[in-house]
Image (spheres, rainbow, N blue to C red):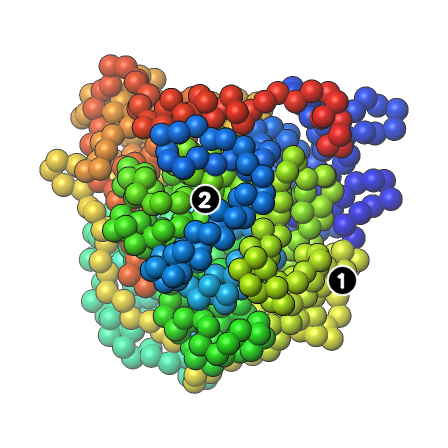
Amino acid sequence: MAHSSTGSVRSQCPYCGVGCGLELMPPAQPGQAVKRDAEGNPVWTARGDRQHPSSQGQVCIKGATVGDTLARGRLSEPLFRSSLDQDFKPISWDQAFDLLEGRIRSTLAAKGPQAIAMYGSGQFHTEDYYLAQKLLKGALGTNNFDANSRLCMSSAVAGYTRSLGSDGPPCCYEDLDHCSVAFLIGTNTAECHPVLFQRLLKRKKRSPKELTVVVVDPRATDTTKAADLHLAIKPGSDLALLHGIAHLVIAAGGLDADFIEEATEGLADFAQLVASATPERTAELCGISEQQLREVAALWARNDRILSLWSMGVNQRREGTAVVCGLINLHLLTGQIGKAGAGPFSLTGQPNAMGGREAGGLAHLLPGYRLVANAEHRAELEAAWRFEPGSIAASPGLAAWQQVEAMERGELDLWWVVATNPLVSMPNLERVKAAMARCPLVVVSDAYADTETAHYAHLLLPASQWSEKAGAMTNSERRVTYCPAYRPRHGQSRPDWEVFAELGRRLGYAQQFTYSSSAEVYAEFAALTAGRVCDVSGLSHALLEQEGPQQWPFPQGSEASSGSKRLYANGCFPTPSGRARFVVDPVLGLAEPPCAVYPLVLTVGRYLGQWHTMTRTAKVDRLQTMHPEPLLEIHPNDAKRFGVVHGELAAVSSRRGSVTAKVLVSDRIRPGSVFLPMHWGFSQDQACEANVLMHDQACPISKQPELKATAVVVAPAVSVVKPVEQSEGRLQRLRRLFLQPSTSENAASRL
């Protein structure tokens, strides 16, 4: 239930894809003063919800302090300027809608729907995602909706679809309690998904002989501390490793012959591919010993319960989809799927990236895991949405980076960025800034005022965020949680779904966008999933609020339960043949390998106490104290080679630009590699735009950029000079306009 008798509220944490349950305590408690932050804003206190089946009462430090982030630094009213060299001025919502409507109508008349694009976010509720699809893909006729899931999960989506026939992780968190081997590759779970890691760690401490933990990562991290075996492979050698393991599994007779015969296809071609992946060749390519390789392969060949877990280290690669498929190949080879404690499990980055995929929130998707390229799927949606046949375009729209390229060419008249901050998270950031400067109208909808992307916008729209709007979110194990509105909306902010619906009505689609609540939006979406892999047709806001979080599939007529479900337990897969596919991909390696001029490989990642681009976490003193600045992690041998000193400043340069950071000399990282966190954008005091350095080459299948590796060189830096942004003068003016101090009176009104 969302509300308790004590006045607390239950919801899902709005940070990562673990989707932990939170219990929020109101600022005013009997006999106590109202809890407020430094600006006088009332603060709700968060703690783990013991009734939530996914997290079982656990919560990380970010979730525990989320109440401190909800009122500070907010965007309160619509703001507009006609050019980037002007100051923003407040306007009304009516004026904002007039601007949007006018631009859309004129663009449709002059250039057509392809000149309009939206870039959304896994911070959306499912209802926001769904109405964005209905507005753009249905009403406007453009499939140019993409989301930051493209930077996060699209390789996992493509890999699941190629191998198994559909998106959707087949596993659940309960598998952490049943697996014999936990195979972690490309994931620093301890810092990026800490509650899941703690669950695994408790299992390991409780039954050390029953669980073997393998971690594949070029760095030694807090995750590797729990590993029985750490493979510090060369960056970009993941697929070679997986092929080498498969070679040894086949040689040892570790196949599940019955499962392969009954439930798979394509083994012969795959076996031929990995025949050349000998232990000697694999060990050399990966930079590990043959003994380490053989130890890991023996674990796969034993046919024990193997659970593989991965995240951005796999997905954010030119070979992202191939590595995902390579991992699934191992599960198919050994029959380790569809059973307790086994399966390929992608760990989602954003809190509702899963819900977004269910709602069609990528440029090639439609709601219910449908595809825009499928004529039958388009017709189903056109009929359900009451649009004319042919309204939905037949070709996939522009993916995130393709939208940037379209702006570069002058092909976009309107780029609408919602609930995300691409001027920190995109690769090749200087190129993104230049592209945005060419777009006639850049619209940014955000809860927070001072984001880097806001400085390149013309129209800013204040968004009601989590805690101020009701909606549903789906976590990594396919569990849907109802998130209630338990605080008043900030200022003039509006939920994104309401903005999309109002704009749809103004554009002449009143019948298609008649909603009085987000519950109505969810009901319409849920009905469209009936019979699909991601069937949630039996769910509603009322059921979720009353019965608590539920895992899909949840078709009409299902009984509510806190238990777990796995996909493909019957060995049947949603492919044309009903069989899972062995996928054959050659090893390519890094898109930009090191060379004589740029001899090091830079990889980027996250810190435990920070979240993505710090729009929330930078407002929490406790989190800032944990990670006060970005540090360049470098091996002692490389530090000596390039003349950089621990605690001093270094310049890191790639073919695209340079940044400076304080040096952390550590043997936790393998020689030849360096590491930077990705959080600090140009608006932060300790600015370090790591993604200025990253190239924009992407996986050709998933279109996900290779944000995990680029070639760099390092050198001593005498002093740090913060880069002078084109918008630097505006930066201070924006802050004066945005960040007006709250008074006790108006703060109290937001209780």
Nearest the viewer among 695 and 128 is: 128
Which quadrant of the figure has residue 561?
Answer: bottom right
- Which dot marks residue 543? 1
Q: Is residue 35 visible?
A: no
Residue 39 percent location from the top left of the image: 65, 20
SS assignment at label 1: helix
Q: Is residue 410 visible?
A: yes
- Give the residue number, with chain letter if any, for mark 2: 443
The structure residue drawn at horizontal position 44% and vertical position 66%, both measured from the top left corner, is 141
Which quadrant of the figure has residue 474?
Answer: bottom right
Residue 740 percent location from the top left of the image: 59, 22
Going by the image, does 172 lie left or right of 418? right
Nearest the viewer among 118 and 321 is: 118
The structure residue drawn at horizontal position 30% and vertical position 43%, both measured from the top left corner, is 438
Residue 165 percent location from the top left of the image: 44, 74
Mark in the foreground, 1 or 2: 2
The structure residue drawn at horizontal position 46% and vertical position 63%, both measured from the top left corner, is 140
SS assignment at label 2: strand
Callout 2, which amino acid?
Answer: Val
Position above or below: 650 against 64: above
